[in-house]
Image: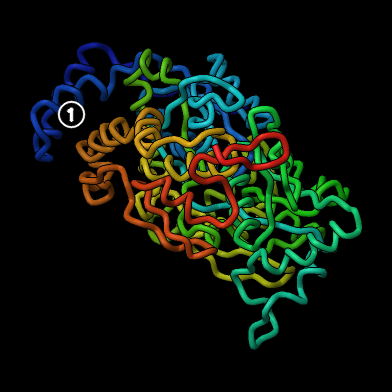
Amino acid sequence: MTGRRDPKPSIDKLTRRRFLTSTAAAVAASGLSAPFVGRARAEALDVEKDELKLGFIKLTDMAPLAIAYEKGFFEDEGLFVTLEPQANWKVLLDRVITGELDGAHMLAGQPLGATVGFGTQAHVITALSMDLNGNGITVSNEIWEMMKPQIPVRADGRPQHPIKADSLKPVVERFRDEGRPFNMGMVFPVSTHNYELRYWLAAGGIHPGFYSRDNISGQIMADALLSVTPPPQMPATLEAGTIHGYCVGEPWNQQAVFKGIGVPVITDYQIWKNNPEKVFGVTKAWHDAYPNTHLAVIKAMIRAAIWLDENDNANRPEAVRYLARSEYVGADYEVIANSMTGTFEYEKGDKRAVPDFNVFFRYFATYPFYSDAVWYLSQMRRWGQLAEQKPDSWYHDLAKKVYRPDIYLQAARLLVAEGKAGMANFPWDSDGYRGPQTEFIDGIAFDGRAPNAYLDSFPIGLKGRQVVEGNEVLEG
């Protein structure tokens, strides 16, 4: 557990009034409208709660929390923050919902899954995306050797990337013919890892299984059986032979390389270029009770994201030193640095440049796009976590209920007014939807404005009025 109290003297009311006056002047000088000046004055200092406990899972993409703490950005907002690692994603979500945690590093799908009531029912929101990319799919050494004959090679003899699941399909079929289950791990049913692993498998003709109202295993009609394993336990579970591969965030893919027990075959950057990964989540009730505190947290984390990416990632080695400590990720510096500093190692010794493996601020990474929410909701429907067809309007309404760019932009305006961020760093005129995205492993384009048309484009997955009943798909 990590905690720090602001060492600066508390600010009395006179000092607050002076500061508010100066902030209002800064806002006015920035060209922002007069109505915003009033909000800036209220939100700049008047946090309703200054002692916070924030949760995280031991992954490198919790970095914005660690950096906001270590660089004093939380303190600058008048916040005394304790950062506390959690055992797994379910415990983390439950503790945010019960109020034991004020907020947390979350999977992008968690606020959405909770709000629609998959597994847990609670209105959770996010006003900040913590990063892009950052995951990989690793297979055991045995599976890698079985895949290699199907993988094209470059002139230098190394495997040609990206490696598609087509090369895994004969292996899965061999397991089936021998009566052996092909097991793979992911971190949570509504995790990015679950959907990315499913996406990659399905793009290679391997069915990852459906969910239904009565069977939430996710293994109905599956060729590969996916199950939950907490991230830090992935390498040990692979080494024990319980699973044959997994999808997880760093440093647990690189840990498999260092231990010599597995080979990462693809990164999520290669599955979906610049995909949203983690978010910072709080309950809607918590936000309503502490709106200025929420803004203060978002401001600090935006500053941390800027610091992590500025000057072409020049600060990453320092960030890795923090993350390597036991209170954060607790892995060797070299393991974390393998991906955080712009490279990624596949087979032992096959290290390649992947400068955007971890992105924290570039490409408007911190902005919570509605279209990102729609993509995750589309995958919930694709695999049966949403049992019935929903109109396009439902996806848009749910995205706007959970993803809150309005809060994000309030925090961004404050940072600009204070001279801590530039106007060009934020998508002020966005309607919340990215343009159509085409850089997926299967080449299928995604337009967040048309989720049902997107679902209809997949050869594997539910579409239209289809429902899963028992062990089959029926036309609804």
Residue 287, placed above or below residue 458: above
Mark 1 closeness class: few <14, some 14–19, many ≥20 residues within 10 Å: many
286, 196: nearer the viewer: 196
Q: Residue at x 28, y 32 (%)?
A: 406
Where disc 1 sits, the SS reads helix
Residue 426 picture location, percent across and down: 27, 46
Residue 4 picture location, percent across and down: 51, 25
Amino acid residing under circle 1: Thr
Quarter of the image where the N terminus is located: top right
Q: Residue at x 23, y 17 (%)?
A: 16
In the visual, does 372 lie left or right of 151? Answer: left
311, 92: nearer the viewer: 92
| Residue that extends furthest to the right in the rendered view of this protein | 178
Q: Is residue 404 visible?
A: yes
Residue 121, placed above or below residue 229: above
Q: Residue at x 64, y 39 (%)?
A: 58
Which residue is denoted by mark 1 in the rendering? 23
The answer to which image quadrant residue 429 occupies is top left
Residue 56 picture location, percent across and down: 58, 33
